[in-house]
Image (cartoon, grey):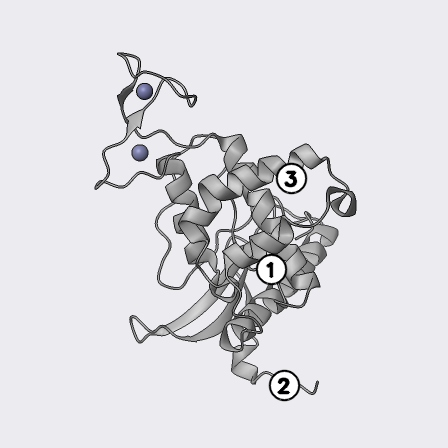
Amino acid sequence: MAKKPTPLHERGTIKELPSGSLRVTVYAGTDKATGRRSNLTRTVPVPKNPSKKQVREAWQEAEKARRGLVSTVEERRHPRTKATVDELLDKYLDISPAQREVEPEHIKHEQNRARNHIRPLIGEVKIAELDAEVFDSFYSELQRCRRHCTRSKRLVDHRTENPHQCDGRCKPHECKPLGASTVRSIHTILSGALKRAVRWKWLSISPIAEADPPPASTSAPSPASSATAEAAPPPSASTAPS
Ligand SMILES: [Zn+2]
Ligand SMILES: [Zn+2]
């Protein structure tokens, strides 16, 4: 399929910041809400007093990020699929354990996590519309309340999930964040499913490469993302396969 070349101004720039780190910026069109130019940006960290090799690697990383961001922009403009996260999960979690080289138990866990945490929150989102902003609010909801309560419903934290007579041990619901390891595993499920979506040619690039799961520590969430859907730089994960 012949593809029109991307206009120059949409191919993005890589600039060296005063700190030495590299700033990748790609024009992403006009923000519908604000009418302002919106950019996708990414910062590739460069260590202090870097060796030549480290500088070269940082530039390679920045170039990879630039290409990724350009594809993300194209993807959003011409989505190949209308599939939702629910539809992707249906298909992904239906792959046989043997084919995925995992234990059947593992897939059962994934199905539970998808049912309890992914589907209720972003199940209806089209996968072509997943971006850093969607993931940011998804992860902050996971860190707010593991039961994803709403104010309208009065919940009770029961003493057991089995059938029981409620007693003093069943308390009015108190929000607790999901554990960091559960959040990580949810991130892994989504990454795995989106990787398949790329393999199935539903997407040309996985949007989750733009998102970082919350750090394993309980540190405060990062400042709210700006209107430019800015992705935080990956914490030293620049060598991890995306
Ligand atoms: Zn109870
Ligand atoms: Zn709650």
| Mark 2 CB near ligand 2 (8 Å cut) | no
**Residue 198, position as x, y percentages in the image:** 66, 63
Mark earlier in primary sequence (3, 1): 3
Residue at horizontal 65 percent and vertical 50 percent from the top: 94
Residue at horizontal 46 percent and vertical 73 percent from the top: 28
- Which is in the foreground here, disc 2 or disc 3? 3
**Residue 223, position as x, y percentages in the image:** 36, 47
Mark earlier in primary sequence (2, 3): 2
Q: Check disc 1 and report the residue beneath it.
A: 206
Q: Quadrant of the N terminus?
A: bottom right
User: Which of the numbered marks, if any, corresponds to residue 5?
Assistant: 2
Residue 193 in view, yes or no: yes
The secondary structure type at the circle numbered 3 is helix
| Amino acid type for the residue under numbered disc 2 | Pro
Q: CA distance from mark 2 to mark 3?
A: 41 Å
Q: Residue furthest top?
A: 168
- Which is in the foreground here, disc 2 or disc 1? 1
**Residue 142, position as x, y percentages in the image:** 41, 40
Q: CA distance from mark 3 to mark 1?
A: 21 Å
Mark 2 and mark 3 in contact? Answer it, CB < 8 Å: no
| Amino acid type for the residue under numbered disc 3 | Ile
For disc 3, the neighbor class at 10 Å (few under 14, some 14 to 19, many from 20) is: some
- Which is in the foreground here, disc 3 or disc 1? 3
Q: Check disc 3 and report the residue beneath it.
A: 107
Out of 131 and 150, give the one closest to the viewer.
150
**Residue 206, position as x, y percentages in the image:** 60, 60
Q: CA distance from mark 2 to mark 1?
A: 21 Å
| Mark 3 CB near ligand 2 (8 Å cut) | no
Residue 209 in view, yes or no: no
| Amino acid type for the residue under numbered disc 1 | Ser
Out of 211 and 169, give the one closest to the viewer.
169
